[in-house]
Image: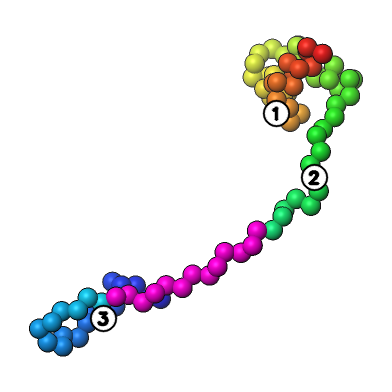
């Protein structure tokens, strides 16, 4: 592709100056998006034993950073702990 700055100067055909128009740029059409997910994701379910183990572990955690580390390790949000404590 020739950039406009690399195009040779127009030939002087007289006193009339005509602006040079760069050639049209052809762009490929966008692809049709494909579905990445083949099945519908399902919500995880947790047993009562698992919930109690996580609640006990977070209750005995030394500080907030430790609780955050537990939640990251288990792939949970703090709202899950709140819901489990209310139940």
According to the picture, the residue beneath numbered tag 3 turns out to be 8
Structural distance between the alpha carbons of marks 3 and 1: 61 Å
Q: Main secondary structure of the magenta part?
A: loop
Q: Earlier in the sequence, mark 1 or mark 2?
A: 2
Q: Quadrant of residue 72?
A: top right
Q: Earlier in the sequence, mark 3 or mark 2?
A: 3
Q: Is label 3 in contact with label 1 (beta carbons under 8 Å)?
A: no
> In this image, 48 relative to 62: left or right?
right
State yes or no: residue 55 in magenta: no
Structural distance between the alpha carbons of marks 1 and 2: 24 Å
Q: Is residue 14 above or below residue 47?
A: below
Please state which of the two labelled residues, at mark 3 or mark 2, is closer to the viewer: 2
Crowding near pointer 2: few (<14 within 10 Å), some, many (20+)? few
Q: Is residue 41 above or below residue 22?
A: above
Crowding near pointer 1: few (<14 within 10 Å), some, many (20+)? few
According to the picture, the residue beneath numbered tag 1 turns out to be 72
Work out whether residue 64 or residue 18 is closer to the camera in this orientation and state it: 18
Q: Is residue 55 visible?
A: no
- Quick one: SS at disc 2? loop
- Quick one: SS at disc 1? helix
* Quarter of the N terminus within the rendering: bottom left
* Quarter of the C terminus within the rendering: top right
Q: Is label 1 in contact with label 2 (beta carbons under 8 Å)?
A: no
Tell me the magenta residue range. Answer: 21-33
> In this image, 18 relative to 58: left or right?
left
Outermost residue to the left: 15
Please state which of the two labelled residues, at mark 1 or mark 2, is closer to the viewer: 2
Q: Residue at x 73, y 16 (%)?
A: 82
Structural distance between the alpha carbons of marks 3 and 2: 58 Å
- Quick one: SS at disc 3? loop
Q: Earlier in the sequence, mark 3 or mark 1?
A: 3
Q: Residue at x 73, y 27 (%)?
A: 76
């Amino acid at each position: 592709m020739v950039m406009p700055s690399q195009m040779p100067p127009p030939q002087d055909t007289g006193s009339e100056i005509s602006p040079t128009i760069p050639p049209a740029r052809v762009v490929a059409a966008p692809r049709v998006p494909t579905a990445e997910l083949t099945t519908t994701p399902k919500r995880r379910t947790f047993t009562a034993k698992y919930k109690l183990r996580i609640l006990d572990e977070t209750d005995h955690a030394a500080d907030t950073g430790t609780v955050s580390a537990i939640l990251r390790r288990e792939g949970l949000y703090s709202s899950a702990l709140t819901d489990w404590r209310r139940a």
